[in-house]
Image: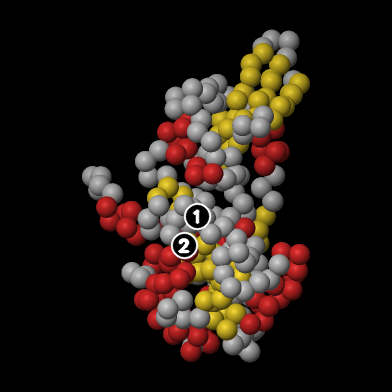
Amino acid sequence: MQLTRRICKSGFIIFNKNSLCDFWQVWMLYFLECPYHTQSVKSALINWTATYRRDSDIVAPYERWQYYDSSVMQIPQTFNYAANKTKKVAWFVSNCHPRNQRMHYARELSKYIQVDIYGACGSLRCPRSQSQTCFDMLDEDYKFYLAFENSNCKDYITEKFFVNGLGHNVLPIVMGAHPTDYARSAPYRSYIHVDEFESPKELAEYLHRLDRDDDLYNSYFRWKGTGEFINTFFWCRVCAMLHDDRPPKYYKDVNEWWRGDGVCTTSSWREHDLTRPQTT
């Protein structure tokens, strides 16, 4: 079988499968950004979806965590991740007009605990051209990092969490995907979700408690050494699906699947869950 591929600017990928016996075309919707930052897809015949979402035909997460042993999710640590750190919360951010309330939340949080905002949205500077120096500063000086996404959407967890947060010796505070999405995607007890708390003030109170208690703070780093982020070999999986003898499928309304009710929220997930009608 011969496969040809063409990638369109719109986010569609077209595959032609042809042999002596058949010829058919697969239209795949390939998005890595969230619905708020992708175009509407209307009147399009889509066979497969390939996005960061877990319900995609081909899941393409920003990172994929895997334990060495699924029964061992925490191990003792000998390193004190709180040692010699004198500053509280840091945030590197350049998009000051996101589709969620992260700017307002950070400003409110700063009323109750030190929040140093670097970049276009704050008063401090640490240029991307010196990114390693910035992250060294994060490791050495700060206990917490705001790994806030620009949108609150289902399964939307990017390098802001995996790289900026978990990739350094700092405790990420997250906003973006639903708390249950983080629980499925991240190492156990490796972060704090803002929706665990009723308000920024309540979160700040807990952060102050962690700041005073090195043992409690270090308990959020026991995931280190229990697993690794793996290569999901996205294009290999696409190729395998194309070679697989499976019946054709298509989405009746892929736009509804991608941006329908409940996929994203401009409020917090805590508020969203409280106001959404309960199903029985």
Q: Percent position (x, y) of residue 241?
A: 64, 31
Q: Which residue is mark 2?
A: 102
- Between the residue at mark 2 and the residue at mark 1, the CA separation in whole angstroms equals 7 Å
Q: Are marks 2 and 1 in contact (CB under 8 Å)?
A: yes
Mark 2: which amino acid? Answer: Arg
Left or right: 111, with 74 as reference point: left
Q: Residue at x 59, y 87 (%)?
A: 86
Quarter of the figure with residue 261? top left
Q: Is residue 24 visible?
A: yes
Compared with residue 26, is residue 38 higher up or lower down, i.e. above or below?
below
Compared with residue 151, is residue 39 higher up or lower down, i.e. above or below?
above
Compared with residue 75, is residue 48 higher up or lower down, i.e. above or below?
above
Q: Percent position (x, y) of residue 63?
A: 62, 54
Q: Tag 2's secondary structure?
A: helix
Q: Percent position (x, y) of residue 33?
A: 57, 45
Image disc number at residue 98: 1
Left or right: 238, with 100 as reference point: right
Q: Residue at x 66, y 38 (%)?
A: 237
Mark 1: which amino acid? Answer: Pro
Q: Percent position (x, y) of residue 21?
A: 69, 10
Task: Pick whichever, 234 or 107, lies toward us.
Answer: 107
Q: Residue at x 70, y 44 (%)?
A: 233
Q: Is residue 241 visible?
A: no
Task: Pick whichever, 65 or 94, lies toward us.
Answer: 94
Near mark 2 (Cα within 10 A), the count class, few <14, some 14-19 or many ≥20, is: many
Q: Residue at x 62, y 34 (%)?
A: 11
